Image (cartoon, grey):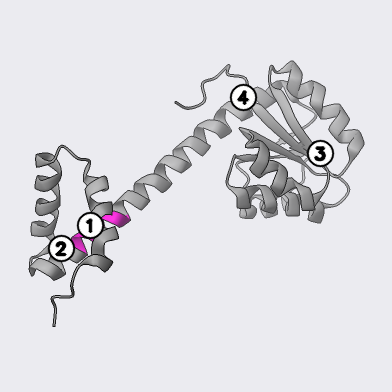
Amino acid sequence: MGYLAGDQLRVLIANERQDRLALLVPIVAQLGHEVIAHESDVAEVAAVTARERPDVALVGLGQSSKHALEMIDQIVKEAACPVIALLHAPDREFVNEASKRGVFAAITDREPDEWQNALDIVLRRFAEYHDLEAAFARRSTIERAKGILMERHSINEDEAFAMLRDHARDANQKLADLAAAVADGQALLPNQSR
C-alpha cells in the first residue's frame, strides 16, 4: 500500500541553521505530519535517515549551498525517501544542482500552504519511480534468463521466452520469479557449450 493524500507522514527536516529548524517543525505539524527527526549535521543525516526511515525529507538551504547539497547527497544515497529542497527565496542555480543530486521538488518556505500539494505530488512521483526501477529490474532478470535458456537449449529468443512463460503458467508461478530462479541458478548449471 502506498501513500494516500491525507495520510500522516514521517518527516525528516535537515538544515544547517538551528533557528530555521525550529521554525519548520511547527509548520510540518500544522499540516498534520510528524517530524521524526531534525538534523543540522551532514555527518549524521545519513545515519538518521537509515535509522528513522522517513517518508519524506525536507532539506533547507541555510547559509551554505554546499552544506545543503551534501545533506541531499547523504539522504539520496540512503534511497529511503524523496527529498524536497526548501528555499527561503528562489535560487535557480541551487535548484539545478539539487536536481542533479536527486531532489524531487523545490519549494519556498514563504508559501507553507502549498507544501501539502508538493508533498502529495512528490510522494506519488517517488512511488512511480520505484515502480519503474522494479519493472526495469524484472525486465533485466527476464532477459538474463532468456539468454541462459538460449545458450543451454540452443534456441532463439522467442522460444526461450515461450519456455519461461509456459513453465511459469504450468507451475502457477510469476514469470519474474521463475526468471530470477533461472538466472540465480546459472552458476549451478554445467557449462554445456564446450
Separation of disc 2 and disc 3 at Cα?
A: 57 Å
**Mark 2 packing: few (<14 Cα in 10 Å), some, or many (20+)?**
many
What kind of element bears circle 1? helix
Q: What's the magenta region?
A: 140-147
Q: Main secondary structure of the magenta part?
A: helix
Between 167 and 3, the one lying in front of the other is 167
What kind of element bears circle 4? helix
What kind of element bears circle 2? helix
Asked if residue 158 lies left or right of residue 133, the reply is left
- Rendered residue at 39%/45% (across/down): 134
Q: Mark 1 and 2 residues: CB-CB less than 8 Å, in contact?
A: yes
> Which comes before the other along the chain, label 2 or label 3?
3
> Which comes before the other along the chain, label 1 or label 2?
2
Q: Is residue 80 magenta?
A: no
- Residue occupied by mark 2: 149
> Which comes before the other along the chain, label 3 or label 4?
3
Separation of disc 1 and disc 4 at Cα?
A: 44 Å
- Disc 1 residue type? Val
